[in-house]
Image (tube, helix red, strand yellow):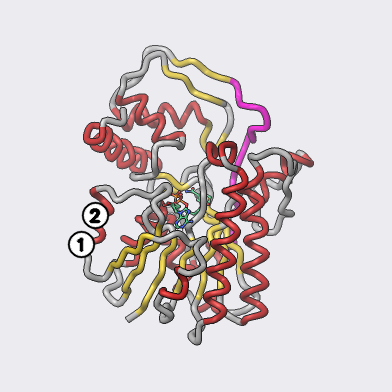
Amino acid sequence: MKKILITGGAGFIGYHLANELLKNPANHLTLVDNLQRGRIDEDFKALLKNKRVQFIKADLTDQKFYKKLDKNFDQVYHLAAVNGTKWFYKMPQEVLRINTLSLIYILEWIKSLKKKTKLCFTSSNEAYAGALASFNKLPIPTPEKVPLVISDTYNPRWTYGATKLVGELFVIFYAKVYNFPAIIVRPHNFYGPRAGYDHVLPEWSQKIIARQDPFTICSPKETRTFCYITDAVKAMRMLMDSSITDNQPIETVHIGASDEITMEKLAEKMFEAAGWKPKKIISQPSPAGSVKRRLADITKIKKLIGWRPETKLADGLKKTFEWYTVHSKKYGKA
Ligand SMILES: NC(=O)c1ccc[n+]([C@@H]2O[C@H](COP(=O)([O-])OP(=O)(O)OC[C@H]3O[C@@H](n4cnc5c(N)ncnc54)[C@H](O)[C@@H]3O)[C@@H](O)[C@H]2O)c1
């Protein structure tokens, strides 16, 4: 039996990761979330029907919580964080406090355990995005070993990136000094069902369902990559299960797709997946500071564990749109 803790377990990645981990009958999961963003929806309720899943509603910035928490975990995926651009502007001080404090408490708790518990920390490409904003220079595709930069401490947008930057340092040196295995992953644009309603593909899905015409697309010429969530959580699981990542020094690994697509081409593919196309498309210029290309170098993960994304974009978009169609109708979100 393997005991696994997922913090932020009711969120987008946490939910899909739990489903991935349950494929192994030896795995028993504890999911912790304060439901700041995660939801107990029908999908999550179905997940909780599995006898190998336990859910605890708790705030990870409450130090008392760790006294009650079981001490016998083999692995911890620390996903909990305040995530989503609107929060960076609405409550930057809380982004800083919650993301940093919850990580420090998790690390202090792991440090106190008798067992060598392996940790996966989800950082972000926002930890290095400031290098481009400040110096207009980053290799593309971008490898793991680039400088992490906060380009403007007075701009609330960088509070989240700052927590990931300092978070990486906390994980590296706690793992080194207290000698427990750990891995840092930097997710790059994961997408799929149950991803909330704030990101580009959920927003487009809502607009398509509402038959919005003319249809507005921001930054049509900018390119991005999109990594389907089931591929992404498989990568996380494989990294954590691989003995290659048990050794010091710990690894920092990019997870993402490598086929770049412009936003206007992405919209075309989304219309195909949805079986509907607006008559008129209005292109809006990129917001100030928007990045022309964002592309992770995934050579390292391929070398370490032989992972590569498998889901074709057209298939992933179709599944995503189908989910939003069903759930928009059900919850009246469209
Ligand atoms: N989705 C992506 O493409 C992406 C990209 C870069 C980084 N990440 C990182 O991956 C992790 C998971 O991302 P996600 O997309 O699933 O986000 P999410 O917002 O869906 O999930 C995070 C979860 O953490 C919970 N949470 C927040 N504060 C908490 C607290 N104090 N105590 C307990 N739970 C708390 C939220 O309720 C939420 O369910 C985050 O750390 C995020 O920064 C994700």
**Residue 150 position in % (x across, y down):** 72, 47
Q: CA separation, marks 1 and 2?
A: 7 Å
Query: Does 75 appear above or below 332?
Result: below
Q: Would residue 168 be found to the left or right of residue 105 on screen?
A: right
* Residue beneath the point at 34% across and 25% down: 208
Disc 1 residue lies near ligand 1 with CB under 8 A: no
The rendered magenta stretch, by its main secondary structure, is classed as loop
Q: Quadrant of residue 48?
A: bottom left
Numbered badge on residue 98: none
- Foreground residue among 133 and 293: 133
Q: Give neighbour class at mark 1: few <14, some 14-19, many 20+ (Cα, 10 Å).
A: few
Front position in the image: 281 or 19: 19
Residue drawn at point x = 61 percent, y = 43 percent: 92
Secondary structure found at label 1: loop
Which region is colored magenta? 285-300
Type of the residue with mark 2 = Lys
Q: Position of residue 23 (x, y in %)?
A: 29, 67
Residue 310 visible to the viewer: no
Residue sitting at x 58%, y 31%? 222
Looking at the picture, how far across and down is residue 255, in whole percent? 52, 55
Amino acid type at image mark 1: Lys
Q: Secondary structure at mark 2?
A: helix
Magenta segment includes 158: no
Taking the image as shown, residue 15 lies to the left or right of residue 180, namely left
Q: Which residue is mark 2?
A: 45
Residue 78 drawn at (x, y percent): 49, 63
Quadrant position of the C terminus in the picture: top left
State if disc 2 and disc 1 touch (CB < 8 Å).
yes
Q: Which residue is mark 1?
A: 49
Residue 171 location, quadrant: bottom right
- Which residue is outermost to the bottom? 114
Name the quadrant of the N terminus. bottom left
